[in-house]
Amino acid sequence: MTTKIAIFGVGLIGGSLALCFKGKEGLTVVGHAHRPELAQKYISRGVVDSATLSVEEAALDADFIFLCVPVGLLEEYLIQLSKLPLKPGCIITDVGSTKASIAACALTLDLPDVHFIGGHPMAGSERSGVEAASSLLFENAYYVLTPPPDVPEEAYHSLSSLLLHTKAQIVRLDPEHHDEIVGAISHLPHIIAVALVNQIHAYDNKDSLYSTLAAGGFRDITRIASSDPVIWRDILLNNRSVMLRLLKDWNQEVDAFIGLLEAGDGTGIEQAFHEANSFRSQLPERRKGIITPLFDLHIDVPDHPGIIGRIATELGDQGINLSNVQIIESREDVPGIMRLSFRQETDMERAKILLQQRDYTVYV
């Protein structure tokens, strides 16, 4: 007996899920596309077993339906599915980074013998689209499921068992609890990064030295400000009430620092840094998370012609994939004058060993 999995939105997340399921015994994966060229791309890249432009055809007799469309479209798709004759026992899930609103929407719909269980795989990539899809994307990441109180345990275990193919660690949460936590550890940092970059941009309009000297560490700590504007518009509006509370808390933290500076309280400033340092040191360094980790090496090298090509060649000869190289002009808070970036942690570790063997000074 074959289990049919329908995926709506075969991009980075949907495509990676498809690759986790495709080829597994007893599973067949159907991808829904809204344009013919996309359907052909899914097939030619071997991401799905079949693709269709029809919502009805994709959902017909599906045992599992994954909604991997943008957050702003989730409710629209769920409402459309609720009007179709879905297979009894079908499980619908999503991958949105907010959970309370889609859970509330599901409760308003007539879904007889169909179960909705919210989901959020907390892994991503700085690349997007089906071209970036990988069966390894979710490995060792957390995958949150937010089942409603009345969902049968059998349905929950059926979905969590299917997701074992992703090699992610399943975490069960209430939708509201999820949104509070993810709002704090992901959505709030994105707002802060955007606000900080825009603040510096305003200064730079009057004095271009701000952008000239803002290389190195500033780019690293604000890189998430380059995230997709439309996606983040939808996420933040969807999680608006949580974000308003978190921003008020953030303002209190900023006000506390203002008070320390106004009072010239050096001891208080030290304590704030000690407290942050202590908590941050307890955080896991290498586990995949909702904010994509950096796999960068910094190295000290002589600044002379040919050095970049030599290092790239040495890595390439060993089959190590290098995604980016940057010569750092401003080195404040950044060790080394060259940054090497990798898409995989294993490539970074291999490069570190190789470069150290070549007598380069390497910083992680």
Image: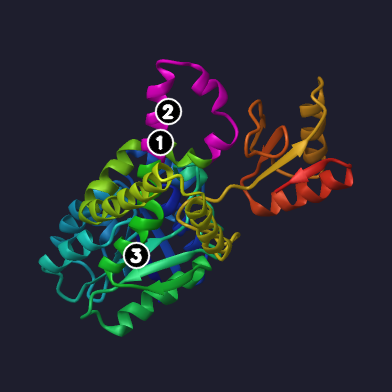
Looking at the rendered structure, the kind of residue marked 1 is Leu
Looking at the rendered structure, the kind of residue marked 2 is Ile
Residue 299 is situated, as x and y percent measured from the top left of the image, at 75, 39
Up-down relation of residue 344 to residue 334 (above or below): below
* Dot placed on the residue nearer the N-terminal end, 3 or 2: 3
Residue 278 is situated, as x and y percent measured from the top left of the image, at 55, 63
**Residue 200: mark in rendering:** 2
Is 84 left or right of 163, judged from the image as shown? left
> What residue is shown at x 40% (from left), y 53% (from top)?
186
Q: In which quarter of the image is the N terminus?
A: bottom left
Is 344 left or right of 245, judged from the image as shown? right
Give the residue at mark 3: 119
* Dot placed on the residue nearer the N-terminal end, 3 or 1: 3
Up-down relation of residue 165 to residue 304 (above or below): below
Marks 3 and 2: CB-CB under 8 Å?
A: no
What residue range appears in magenta?
A: 193-220
Is 209 left or right of 342, judged from the image as shown? left
Label 3, label 2: how far apart the Cα atoms are: 37 Å
> What residue is shown at x 27% (from left), y 60% (from top)?
59
Q: Quick one: 234 or 63, which is closer to the camera?
A: 234
Give the residue at mark 1: 196
Residue 8 is situated, as x and y percent measured from the top left of the image, at 32, 53
Label 2, label 1: how far apart the Cα atoms are: 6 Å
